[in-house]
Amino acid sequence: MNPKLPYDYKDLTPHMSEEQLRIHHSKHHQAYVNGGNGLLERLDKARKENAEIDIKATLKELSWNIGGHVLHSLFWGNLTPAGKGGGGKPASPLSDALSREFGSFERFKKEFTQAASGVEGSGWAALSLDRLTGRPLVMQIEKHNTNVYPTFKILMVLDVFEHAYYLDYKNDRAKFIETFWNIVNWNEVNQRFQQALK
Ligand SMILES: [Fe+2]
């Protein structure tokens, strides 16, 4: 099963409608969970029977499904209802790290927005952390699993697959990205940041 949401389907309105969130979570995210589990079962079965399996195709599909599951789980956790912790700006120490790296919070927001709007086809924008240097980095992930930096800890993600916004915003990805800032759970992102530095 995919993880239960920390809020109700209706709680992110008007930024994300109940129908949009319900379908995204219960159908799209669930499909990656089912897909990943199915592939793992197929691998288990082939090993038990010592049968041939197309390893290249299986691993590629597995990476897509597990990447999808992991990123969606992070996504639900870094959202929260507007006005109940959602939106605004991060507190210290994340705010200090962002200012140090990007010059200002506004500059970070601009780069993250550009990363999200510039994803070709389906993908994600992510704020990640290089744990070795403590430097935050914006990633532009294609699909669920391309351009990911191994060992970098992902702190915050924004899903820009069309399935994430089409019911609410049709093809207007820019509007969806703009509204995302109203429901960011900065408290959670800040906690992930501090956890990653330990
Ligand atoms: Fe999604």
Image: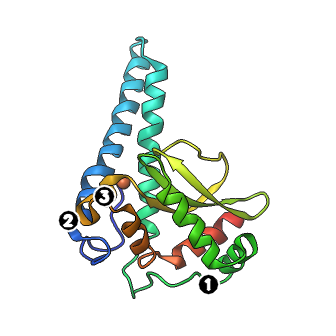
What amino acid is found at the position of numbered circle 1 in the picture? Ala
- Please name the residue shown 30% across and 71% down the image: 16
Dot 1: few (<14), some (14–19), or many (≥20) neighbours within 10 Å? few
**Mark number for residue 147?**
none
- Please name the residue shown 38% across and 38% down the image: 36
Dot 2: few (<14), some (14–19), or many (≥20) neighbours within 10 Å? some
What amino acid is found at the position of numbered circle 2 in the picture? Glu
Above or below, comparing residue 34 to residue 47 in the picture: below
Q: How far, Cα to Cα, is label 3 from label 1?
A: 33 Å
Are the residues at dot 2 and dot 3 in contact (C-beta closer than 8 Å)? no
In the figure, is residue 161 to the left or right of 188? left
- Quadrant of the displayed image that contains ligand 1: bottom left
Q: How far, Cα to Cα, is label 2 from label 3?
A: 17 Å
Q: How far, Cα to Cα, is label 1 from label 2?
A: 32 Å
**Mark number for residue 19?**
2
Above or below, comparing residue 150 to residue 84 in the picture: above
Mark in the foreground, 3 or 1:
3
Question: Residue 49 location in percent, x, y?
Answer: 38, 14
Q: Residue furthest bottom?
A: 83
Mark 2, secondary structure of its residue: helix
Mark 1, secondary structure of its residue: loop
What amino acid is found at the position of numbered circle 3 in the picture? Asn
**Mark number for residue 171?**
3
Q: Nearer the viewer, residue 44 or 146?
A: 146
- Please name the residue shown 23% across and 57% down the image: 23
For label 1, the residue is 91
Sequence-first disc among 3 and 1: 1
Sequence-first disc among 1 and 2: 2
Question: Residue 180 location in percent, x, y?
Answer: 42, 72
Mark in the foreground, 2 or 3:
3
